[in-house]
Image (cartoon, rainbow, N blue to C red):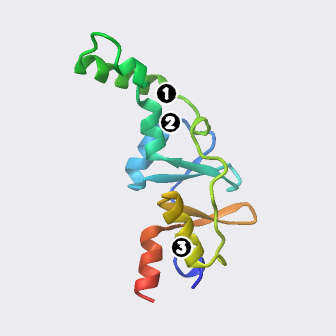
Amino acid sequence: MLVENAYQTNPPTILNTANLAIAADLFIETKSSDLMVVDQNGSFIGILSEGDLIRRCMPKYSELIADGLSLDDIFELFIEKGKMSSQENVMTIAITNPITVTTQTNLQKAASYMVSKNIRRLPVVEDGKLIGSVSRAMIAKAILNP
């Protein structure tokens, strides 16, 4: 069985010119944990995950253990770092060389990538253009409900 039997077209995308505040809105709007980063022509650039977005806003460990910080102080650092990061371009944290598959990739191969690298969703790319994505759930459904 091939990826062409299990992928979704029109996955959630974000332009490579967008900022992190727009990305946060899109994660909520699309209910997705990953956004595919594309350019104006639809060429695939990379992936932005909600985990990467949260990590960008987290204060550094050394800031958290500084003497005398209360929980309120730590929360304020988190909020402040988020505000400072909101206008950064998505490309500052996007994964720009992710594993990709094509429609002709074997589902077992795609699944093995996902399991071995702890990846939730893979971009489906043809001739440099994003044409879809395949998730672990989509692969499971295709295999369990042929």
Mark 1: few, some, or many residues within 10 Å (few <14, many ≥20)?
some
Say what secondary structure mark 1 lies in: helix
Q: Are marks 2 and 1 in contact (CB under 8 Å)?
A: yes
51 to 101, vertically: above or below: above
**Left of 101 or right of it: where is 135?**
left
**Left of 77 or right of it: where is 20?**
right
* One can see residue 9 in this view: no
Amino acid bearing label 3: Tyr
Q: CA distance from mark 2 to mark 3?
A: 27 Å
Mark 3 or mark 2, which is nearer the start of the sequence?
3
**Left of 63 or right of it: where is 74?**
left
The residue pinned by badge 2 equals 20
The residue pinned by badge 3 equals 7
Q: CA distance from mark 2 to mark 1?
A: 7 Å
130 to 85, vertically: above or below: below
Q: Which residue ends up furthest to the top in the rendered image? A: 68
Q: Which mark is residue 85?
A: 1
Amino acid bearing label 1: Ser
Residue at figure coordinates x 36%, y 25% from the top left: 78
Amino acid bearing label 2: Leu
Residue 102: quadrant of the picture: bottom right
Residue 55 picture location, percent across and down: 44, 36
Mark 1 or mark 2, which is nearer the start of the sequence?
2
